[in-house]
Amino acid sequence: MNKRKIYINTMRGLMFICTALTALLVLFLFSYVLLKGLPNITWELLSTKPSYLQNRIGILPDILNTIYIVIATLVVVLPLGVGAAIYLNEYAQNKKVVELIEYAAETLSGIPSIIYGLVGMLLFSNNFGTSILAGALTLVIMNLPTIMRTTQESLKTVPQSYREGAFGLGAGKWRVIRTVVIPGCIDGVVTGCILAIGRIIGESAALLFTAGFAHAINGFFTGLTSPGATLTVALYVYAKEEGEFAVAFAIAAILMVLTLLINLSTTLVGKFFAKRRNI
Amino acid sequence: MRKNKIFEDIVHGIFLILGLITVGCVLLITVYLIISGLPAIREIGLINFLFGKEWASTAAEPKFGILPFILSSIYGTAGAIVIGVPIGFFTAVYLSKVASKKVRTTLETAINLLAGIPSVVYGLVGMIILVPAIRHIFKVPDGSSLLAAIIVLSIMILPNIIKVSITALDAVPIEYEDASLALGATPIETYFRVSVPAAKSGIAAAVVLGVGRAIGEAMAVMMVAGNVANMPSLFQSVRFLTTAVSSEMAYSSPGSLQRNALFSIALVLYMFIMLINVVLNFFLKREKEK
């Protein structure tokens, strides 16, 4: 009897301790980074580029590069990922092919980003130079499984009767997909986009050798073809190579806030579409 | 009618190609890594490469032995699992079985946040807090060490372990638990002696996923582990397979044996990941078949 009690109490204690530890860890990480980083964020930091002459560091180029890379990646990965999901859910008849594609997607999501970086360097940077575009194309491969998975999940929730209704009215397969299936899976596409944005913003190892380290301010199209550091790569360079910890923490705080916003919007988007579906 | 059929076939073909892109990407990555990884292995010799204890790529008489990297990666991952899995496991059981709905939602949000933090931020915090703390507490000359990497990795794999374990624990049929409770077991005994064994393949999958994430992490490790090619020891600076690739890539010249050897390291890392994938799929399949 006593032994039983000890067992129960130990297990209960361990559960409480571990859960508390996890919660405190998150709380600590967030408050520490925000407290150390937010005071260092100044308008000058956000609105200028680094200059050795004036002994000043600005992260505007890195912010712009991050935005460019997000846009470029999404533009390419969305049609690919959504198309792949539509193929799997609407066209594929052969079970073997479906299994093969799903296995490939799973494999892709397990490959570490440093390997993506290497392959991206060989495939893209060696062909058209270290550039934001090369980085974006590398990230396309990385994010393909994410978009595919979320789209597929929401395709499964489009009622079969909608498709049958459209077929019954004499629509061809493509027309059914265009008018019934794609509008029905928009929630999955949006969720996938948000998740992909989060991953792109947080990615660094895959970009080191594909997108490079430059801090120049460019317009979108020149930006695409020239090298540039994103926020995460800039953080790494400032912290590890240059010892500018104040700037590094400022960037870290920005990244934390973005992480918060992205998580918040995933939840909100989920709720929004769930509500719309129920009406 | 004919024209319509041709149009539909073309659309079908386009979607087929889009569907096969993932397969193409996997093939492309595999082929590229093998092609660029093999020359150096052939030149150095497989045994010398994998089991050589010394890495001196820029010395007058260069040595390319990656045993220190392989062992550092394995020890680092094992350490992260030893610390991270118990914490993640107990948290998952608590959240899945004991916690009230409010606590669960709050903590799940927190865990999602933890999963979303970029790895360079983990690296930065590790550099500023963990490394000096290790130097202080253990009185070692430099805190950048295997231990620092292990602690950072164990935090980074927590969200994966917790989330996958919760999914597995939630899927345990309520009848199992009811039966156990009806036989006189207390709730806690039921959770650990009935629910956990029933969810064991899912929890195993969570662990394997954690292994994959830990062995593949580059940036955070690079920032806290010091990057010296030592044989692994807890308080010494070490280099993982991932960081071995990234730390020398910037200054190795294309076509040199040094750069080719870096590709070979990536190939070895890729093999590890593929092995982990096979194990992961085994557990996921078993979980599904239940």
Image (tube, rainbow, N blue to C red):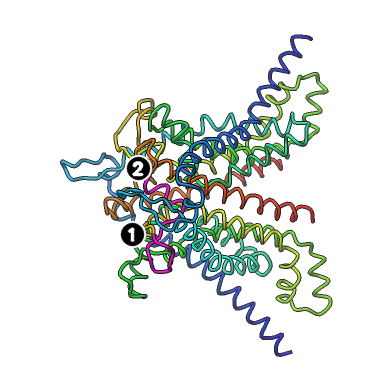
**Residue B32 appears left or right of A37:** right
Which of the 4 image quarters holds residue A19? bottom right
Q: What amino acid is found at the position of numbered circle 2 in the picture?
A: Ala
In this picture, is B209 found above or below A134? below
Please tell me the numbered disc located at residue B250.
2
Q: What amino acid is found at the position of numbered circle 1 in the picture?
A: Lys
Residue B257 is situated, as x and y percent measured from the top left of the image, at 39, 41
Residue positioned 52% across, 47% down in the render: A112
Between residue B233 and residue B78, name the one nearer to us: B233
- The magenta span reads B230-250
Residue A272 is situated, as x and y percent measured from the top left of the image, at 61, 43
Which of the 4 image quarters holds residue B108? bottom right
**Residue A2 appears left or right of B244:** right
Q: Quadrant of the C terminus of chain B?
A: bottom right
Residue A5 in view (yes/no): yes
Residue positioned 33% across, 59% down in the render: A36
Q: Mark 1 — on which chain does it sit? A: A
User: Hey, which residue is sitting farthest bottom in the picture?
Assistant: A2
Asked if the residue under mark 2 is in contact with the one under mark 1, i.e. CB atoms within 8 Å, the reply is: no
Residue B275 is situated, as x and y percent measured from the top left of the image, at 62, 51
Residue A256 in view (yes/no): no
Residue under circle 1? Answer: A36
Q: Quadrant of the N terminus of chain B?
A: top right
Question: Which structural element holds mark 1?
Answer: helix
Between residue B162 and residue B103, name the one nearer to us: B162
**Residue B242: in magenta span:** yes
Q: Mark 2 — on which chain does it sit? A: B
